[in-house]
Amino acid sequence: MKASATVVDTCITDLELMQRWLNPLLKCEPMGVWGTSVGSKSRFTIQIPVIKPTLKNTVIAREPGLIIWGFDGFFKGKDRWECQPNDRGTRLINSFEFNIPNQAIAWGFDRFAAKWTKMDMEAQLRRLKLVAEELHQSFDD
């Protein structure tokens, strides 16, 4: 993307900027004071009426251009974001690894939510690119 690695990293770790590119049905809230240092905790809640599935997460690795969140809730896993500077701006690498311990939930996810989740994550990445490039452009003006 056409933005510096510093700007992309900020878009991934700044709570206000995150809300601009995350799915509008996904709410991120700090558990305590917002932070992205190792051990910082927050929760992601999907705003589905009545059930509101929630994932608690903890920052398990952090360095400039890299953050890894570990998740626990209706599934367990980690979300890794790495910003690699290049001659065009930044190459963003995102990997999301998870398993669903409850077999009934895993079956339902595979049948009904997996395709939607993949499309939603791709849309979030497109929105993240737009936010990062807009922010980068504002620094150039």
Image (spheres, rainbow, N blue to C red):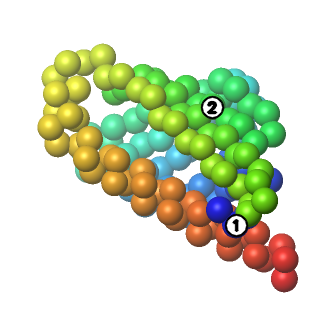
Which tag is nearer the camera, tag 1 or tag 2?
1
For label 1, the residue is: 2
Horizontal and vertical percent position of residue 110: 20, 34
State the residue in front, 97 or 93. Answer: 93
Kindly identify the residue that appears in the image at 74 percent across and 63 percent down: 88
Horizontal and vertical percent position of residue 86: 76, 54
User: In which quarter of the view is residue 61 placed?
Assistant: top right
Give the CA distance from mark 1 to mark 2.
Answer: 23 Å
Quadrant occupied by the C terminus = bottom right
Kindly identify the residue that appears in the image at 59 percent across and 63 percent down: 129
Q: Mark 2: which secondary structure?
A: strand
**Which sits earlier in the primary sequence, circle 1 or circle 2?**
1
Image check: 35 left or right of 131? right
Horizontal and vertical percent position of residue 97: 45, 29
State the residue in front, 29 or 72. Answer: 72
Image check: 65 left or right of 102? right
Quadrant occupied by the N terminus = bottom right
Residue 10 sits above or below residue 96 on the image: below
Is residue 30 shown to the viewer in this render? no
Horizontal and vertical percent position of residue 32: 66, 35
Residue farthest toward the bottom in the current orientation of the protein:
141
Kindly identify the residue that appears in the image at 73 percent across and 46 percent down: 84
Give the amino acid at mark 2.
Ile
For label 2, the residue is: 68
Please rate how many residues cluster around mark 2, counting C-alpha atoms within 10 Å: few if below 14, some from 14 to 19, many from 20: many
Kindly identify the residue that appears in the image at 57 percent across and 60 percent down: 128
Q: Mark 1: which secondary structure?
A: loop
